């Protein structure tokens, strides 16, 4: 009896996904729970297992194609040796299937040879329209590297020139994967939110002394102590004092939803693009706990191993573009949040203190906010609380978690 596996609704408002890699081929006999396909959706790569045992009669879509929730991914027939499960009574348009844990695929004899490449390399290959199946990897165990992909592009360039526009040659790169998700979210934020940005500087000279003093102790516990946990603590104090920054606006009901919990989103740069993970209940964690969680989640982001839960639920976001040398910016709000705090490059600057010029360590701050919910005065007061706590780290000690 023929069956169909449709792209399941994996929650959190997901409506579509990109096919990253097929793990089976047409004609293969698969077992129930055997991995079928890798998909990318809402910044996460997920492996979908088969809900059936049987023969794959048709794969619906190519790698790089976008498929909607509810559309058929795989068609099955009963294999000669298979024992199909009893037919389930479902509506014709229902979505079936479950999400499995992402794992390295071991190809059965019926499946094509597994392609060894990291998600970042696969993403780059899709950008450059390189078929990984045609490459021989130069990495350990035959793994395909980024250099292998780019060398393949150079060879293709020798054979033919890129398709030109009216003025000259151009590369045409499909908008796919994480970059496509970022583009959609940024466009949505700009269309929906009338945002305003204000800038101020924080003198973190005393905070720097505290961090340097405690950095060795943190390292002994395997924790890298950066400025970011202190910024989170300062932001939490400001969010408590100005709760409208920890809110969302429901356009349909015309209600401001002030969140009574504090999940801090952290933007991190990866080889595939910008990702935002969420530190849940950040107000209940101390500096070292925050530092450790930031390190773990940042590494998972860089290797594309974050799950959907770790990408969802933030109430206020912090982005640190200072690590790449930028001082000020106009960060785009992580919609539907109403505020985002940008951290700039920390520099030693001459400033006037008590009528004397002194060299102090300065952290530039940029606060973007949704002007429908927050007025400029409240935003300035919020930023002042952040600065007070960064300039006087003892306040964080007094307030504890």
Image (tube, grey):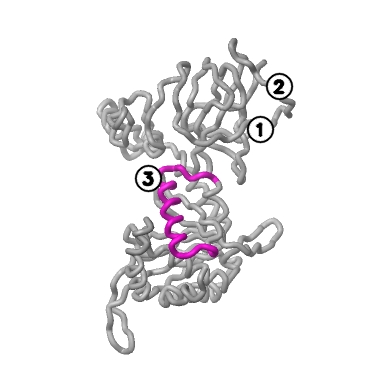
Q: Position of residue 307 (x, y in %)?
A: 52, 44
Q: Earlier in the sequence, mark 1 or mark 3?
A: 1
From the image, tell me which residue sits under label 2: 87
Whole-Å distance between the Cαs marked 2 and 1? 15 Å
Q: Is residue 168 above or below residue 253?
A: above
Q: Is residue 209 visible?
A: yes
Q: Secondary structure at mark 2?
A: loop
From the image, tell me which residue sits under label 3: 271
Q: Is residue 119 left or right of residue 15?
A: left
Q: Which tag is nearer the camera, tag 2 or tag 1?
A: 2
Q: Is residue 18 above or below residue 329?
A: above
Report the front residue among 158 and 309: 309
> Going by the picture, which residue comes out furthest to the top?
80
Residues tagged 1 and 3 counted as in contact (Cβ below 8 A) = no
Q: Position of residue 84 (x, y in %)?
A: 65, 18
Report the front residue among 19 and 331: 19
Q: Residue at x 52, y 17 (%)?
A: 28
Give the main secondary structure, helix, strand or loop, of the magenta stretch. Answer: helix
Q: Residue at x 64, y 64 (%)?
A: 258
Whole-Å distance between the Cαs marked 1 and 3? 33 Å
Q: Residue at x 44, y 47 (%)?
A: 301
Q: Position of residue 17 (x, y in %)?
A: 54, 37
From the image, tell me which residue sits under label 1: 95
User: Where does the N terminus fall, quadrant-wise?
Assistant: top right
Q: Is residue 325 left or right of residue 373?
A: left
> Going by the picture, which residue comes out furthest to the bottom?
355
Q: Secondary structure at mark 3?
A: loop
Q: Secondary structure at mark 1?
A: loop
Image mark count? 3
- Is 390 a magenta residue? no
Q: Is residue 173 visible?
A: no
From which residue to which does the magenta span run?
A: 283-308
């Amino acid at each position: 009896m023929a069956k169909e596996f449709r792209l399941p609704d994996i929650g959190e408002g997901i409506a579509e996904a990109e096919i990253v890699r097929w793990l089976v081929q047409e004609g293969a006999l698969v077992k129930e729970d055997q991995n079928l396909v890798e998909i990318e959706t809402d910044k996460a790569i997920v492996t979908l297992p088969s809900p059936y045992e049987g023969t794959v009669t048709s794969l619906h879509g190519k790698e790089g194609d976008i498929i909607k929730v509810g559309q058929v991914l795989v068609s099955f027939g009963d294999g000669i040796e298979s024992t199909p499960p009893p037919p389930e009574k479902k509506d014709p348009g229902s979505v079936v299937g479950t999400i499995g844990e992402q794992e390295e695929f071991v190809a059965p004899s019926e499946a094509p040879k597994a392609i060894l490449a990291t998600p970042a390399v696969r993403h780059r290959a899709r950008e450059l329209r390189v078929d990984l199946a045609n490459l021989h990897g130069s990495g350990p165990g035959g793994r395909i590297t980024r250099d292998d992909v780019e060398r393949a592009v150079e060879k293709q360039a020798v054979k033919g020139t890129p398709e030109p526009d009216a003025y000259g040659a151009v590369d045409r790169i499909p908008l796919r994967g994480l970059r496509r998700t970022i583009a959609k979210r940024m466009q949505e934020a700009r269309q929906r939110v009338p945002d305003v940005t204000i800038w101020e500087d924080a003198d973190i000279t005393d905070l720097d002394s505290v961090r340097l003093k405690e950095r060795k102790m943190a390292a002994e516990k395997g924790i890298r102590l950066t400025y970011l946990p202190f910024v989170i603590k300062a932001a939490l104090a400001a969010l408590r004092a100005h709760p409208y920054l920890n809110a969302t606006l429901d356009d349909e009901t015309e209600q401001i939803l002030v969140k009574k919990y504090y999940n801090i989103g952290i933007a991190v740069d990866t080889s595939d693009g910008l990702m935002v993970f969420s530190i849940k209940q950040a107000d209940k964690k101390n500096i070292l706990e925050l530092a450790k969680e930031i390190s773990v989640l940042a590494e998972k982001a860089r290797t594309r191993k974050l799950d959907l839960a770790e990408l969802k639920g933030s109430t206020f976001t912090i982005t640190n573009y200072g690590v790449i040398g930028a001082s000020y910016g106009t960060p785009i709000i992580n919609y539907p949040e109403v505020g985002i705090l940008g951290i700039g490059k920390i520099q030693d600057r001459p400033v006037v203190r008590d009528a004397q010029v002194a060299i102090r360590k300065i952290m530039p701050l940029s606060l973007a906010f949704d002007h429908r919910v927050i007025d400029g005065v409240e935003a300035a007061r919020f930023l002042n609380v952040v600065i007070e706590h960064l300039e006087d780290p003892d306040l964080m000690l007094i307030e504890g978690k």
